[in-house]
Amino acid sequence: PSRSQGTYYISFKKKKKGAPYTLICRDIIKNKSTKNVDPIPFVGGMAMSILMIKNGILMNDPNIIPVNIFGFILNLIYFLVFYFYTADSKPLFSMLTKATLFTGVLWGYSTIEDEKLVEYRFGVILTVLMLILIGSPLFSLFLRLISIFHQHS
């Protein structure tokens, strides 16, 4: 396969990680509730998709852009399912507002940073953010385990 076909394949395989989110949404619909479901992956997924689109623009890589537009739409659908079944939407929209502001700040940073430095620095920032987003469920599980441990001691 050509380089661009390979990039599309790799990018599509990365987006297949959305399958667990589909299962989460199925459970939300089945239970008609978002109780014990964290919206961070959905909100963070939308923010990361937007930032990855910007990264594709900075790197002048047109293959990154359509994949992340698809990722944004997919995460938006997941977010809307979450919103429809959530009992209290205030915290959800507070999180969405914070993510939007943070995304805007990073987008703004990428426009004012030196062109020679921005591609590398923005890439490092996105890598750190992705690690945080991926690690957030594990961290929340860790906090729950500590809480349970303290209750039983």
Image (cartoon, rainbow, N blue to C red):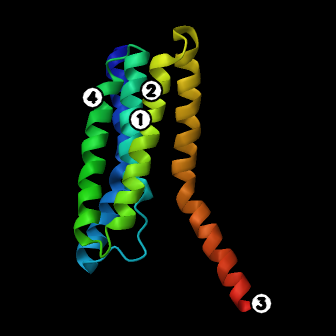
- Per the image, the residue denoted by label 3 is 153
Q: Which of 50 and 30 is in front in this view?
A: 50
Please provide percent x and percent y for residue 120. Answer: 57, 19
Check disc 1 and give the amino acid type.
Answer: Gly
Q: Which mark is residue 83?
A: none
Check disc 3 and give the amino acid type.
Answer: Ser
Q: Which residue lies furthest to the top in this view?
A: 116
Name the element at disc 4. helix
Residue at point 43%, 47% (across, down): 99
- Per the image, the residue denoted by label 2 is 108
Q: Nearer the viewer, residue 109 or 125?
A: 109
- Per the image, the residue denoted by label 1 is 104
Tell me which label, 3 or 1, sits earlier in the chain: 1
User: Are circles 1 and 2 on residues that touch, CB within 8 Å?
Assistant: yes
Name the element at disc 3. loop
Q: Residue 66 carries which label?
A: 4
Please provide percent x and percent y for residue 34. Answer: 34, 73
Tell me which label, 1 or 4, sits earlier in the chain: 4
In this rendering, the answer to whether 129 lies above or below 109 is below
